[in-house]
Amino acid sequence: MTEPTDSNQDGPYTQSLSKESDNYDSMLDELYDLHKQLLQQDLQHSDLAAPQQNQEIDNLEIPILTESLNQEIDHEHQSRKVFDEAQHHLFEQPGTVPAINEEQINAIVTKLMARLKPRVEQLLREKIRAKVIERFNQQS
């Protein structure tokens, strides 16, 4: 299995591919030019053709994609609106809310102490009891 080292063996094949691709490229160029010319002629012949063409292009929309896109856009707008309202509310409220006074602070502390007092007393009693037992054991 020796690889061909002579470039003449690949030459005709490569040249034919090159000619074919050049032909295709020139054909594509001609088609694009023809398309441009036809579009220009259509626009020159009828000024009403342009809006109709735009309407035909608009009618080519895919309904499911259009609906989902519209829903995503609406959702994005709603999210931004909620965010803007929350931000406005956040930055506007501190000036309008009166500061808490001492009486309210004392009432909150009293309620918390009333709830926590039994548990704190139980923990303190258990700690003191453990220390007393430890001292008696050390002395014995």
Image (tube, rainbow, N blue to C red):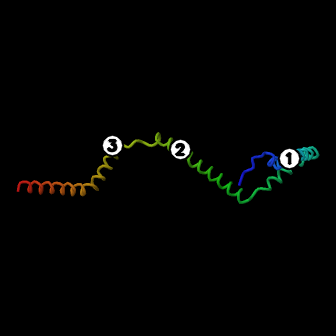
Q: Amino acid at mark 2?
A: Gln
In primary-sequence order, the first of circles 2 and 1 is 1
Q: Which mark is residue 87?
A: 2
The nearer-to-camera label among 3 and 2 is: 2
In primary-sequence order, the first of circles 3 and 2 is 2
Whole-percent x and y of residue 11? 81, 46
In primary-sequence order, the first of circles 3 and 1 is 1
Identify the residue at image location x=79%, y=48%: 10
**Residue sitting at the far left:** 140
Q: Circle 1 is placed at which residue position?
A: 19
Instruction: Decide: few, some or many residues near mark 2? Use Cα within 10 Å; few <14, some 14-19, many ≥20.
Output: few
Residue 79 or 50: which is nearer the viewer?
A: 50
Q: Circle 3 is placed at which residue position?
A: 102
Distance of label 3 from label 2 (alpha carbons)? 30 Å
Whole-percent x and y of residue 16? 85, 49
Instruction: Decide: few, some or many residues near mark 1? Use Cα within 10 Å; few <14, some 14-19, many ≥20.
Output: few
